[in-house]
Image (cartoon, rainbow, N blue to C red):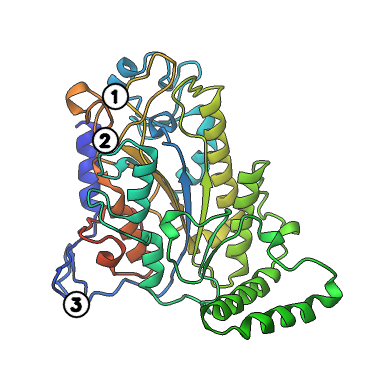
Amino acid sequence: MTHNDQTHIEGQTRREFLVKTGLAAAATSVVAAGLPRTASAQPPGAQRDVLVLLYMRGGMDGVSICVPYGDPELYLRRPTLAIRPPGQTNGATNLDGFFGLSPAALPLMAPYQAGQLLFVHGCGSTDPSRSHFDAQKFMEQGNPNQHGPVSTGWAARHLMSSPPAGSGVLRGVALDYMLPRSLAGAPATLPIAELAGFKLTGPIQSMRSRSRTLGAMYHAHGGELAAITGKTFQAMNLLGSIDFGNYTPQNGAVYPAGEWGGRLANVAALVRADIGVELIEVDMHGWDLHSNLGPLQGSLAFLMDQLSRGLNALWTDLGALNNRVTVMVMSEFGRRADENGNLGVDHGHGGMMILMGGNVVGGRVLGPWPGMGLPQLDNGDLAITVDYRDIVAEVAYRRLGNPNFLTIFPNHTPTFHGAVV
């Protein structure tokens, strides 16, 4: 049995149901393996996870992270840059007899072996664009191949179509200076680059009086401005109850130094505070490596190290709280199958997602693997065998309590792959 066949069979046995949506139906219907069709299916369980969305800007090369060393075509396509098989110098660490972890990504082994980290290879947006700007736009809007006027993002529509898990004062946070497109139009959602600094400055003695004065000033104008100002002050008060600056990671977790590690530590602090935040996004830039890829000691190795150590630290820090969190790592596309003449890899198509959390069916690589042989490639790129919308929709249904698939991803009928329970 080939790895491709085995992965397909495992996917069938783990796939708990196929989602079917009727365009004319007022309620969403679900077709489940072994379950009858229901008029208005509800997601299982009352527990709703916090979704941590980590977006790798620039086109993450999944083939260099979770290495398909069992496919000999890898070494024909990338004779210089491919991570060698297990047992060789600087080789991958075996995962399942076909895939292995890159040396720079070894911190991912701990959550993987604990069954709480899942790789989804051959995953991505079906839109044919290889432009960073267009690919990110259509993926974050949730409308690949449609290109109609869309003003909101898929994550925003998730929040819009589900009731608040808490007070509703602050439902989403992007740890950046601007909202990413996926959260465009999201209710009660703010971009906050520095959570510790999201407060009024000045003497602590006059903080309360100054807040009242400013609130009254904007309230006098009435309308939307007054409402937004009031909600902003409420969010400030909520976040002000958390001491981000002195947060101490738990369970011996050590975050990478710098902005990336600091923001992931902020994620853990937000989760622990349990103030009603439902979705947190953090971006990592720099994955567009057309030259000098450096999977062992260069630029890509640094990015893989930062990503994997950050994920390991967040997973370690949260401990039992991982049962309340689903982490989703995604990128606009993968890289070309072949290395180029500058020891880099150009824009590709099929990529890879990573899921992590206590409710992830991990410790495996979800496929089927598309293959890197010339007849198997999509115009020279890894083909897409799993639509990213399927993974997001399954997480939304099973872990976020949202069955409104047609709202989150218009004109797409998702198939569940057993990624989470």
- Dot 2 falls on a residue whose secondary structure is loop
- Compared with 160, 408 (above or below) is above
Relative image position of residue 413 (x, y in whole percent): 20, 59
Q: In the rendered structure, which disc, 2 or 3, sits on the residue that comes first in sequence?
A: 3
Q: What residue lies at 47% left-to-right and 75% top-to-bottom? A: 165
Per the image, the residue denoted by label 3 is 26
- The mark found on residue 71 in the picture is 1
**Mark 2 burial class by Cα count in 10 Å: few <14, some 14-19, many 20+:** many
Q: Quarter-wise, where is residue 255 in the image?
A: top right
- Dot 1 falls on a residue whose secondary structure is loop
Q: Amino acid at mark 1?
A: Asp
**Mark 1 burial class by Cα count in 10 Å: few <14, some 14-19, many 20+:** some
Q: Amino acid at mark 2?
A: Trp
Q: What residue lies at 39% left-to-right and 48% top-to-bottom? A: 362
Please name which of the two marks, 2 or 3, marks the residue nearer to the observer: 3
Per the image, the residue denoted by label 2 is 369
Q: In the rendered structure, which disc, 1 or 2, sits on the residue that comes first in sequence?
A: 1
The answer to whether the residue labelled 1 contacts the one labelled 3, judged by CB atoms less than 8 Å apart, is no
Marks 2/3: CA–CA distance = 37 Å
- Dot 3 falls on a residue whose secondary structure is loop
Relative image position of residue 307 (x, y in whole percent): 53, 40
**Is residue 196 visible to the viewer in this orientation of the structure?**
yes
Please name which of the two marks, 1 or 3, marks the residue nearer to the observer: 3
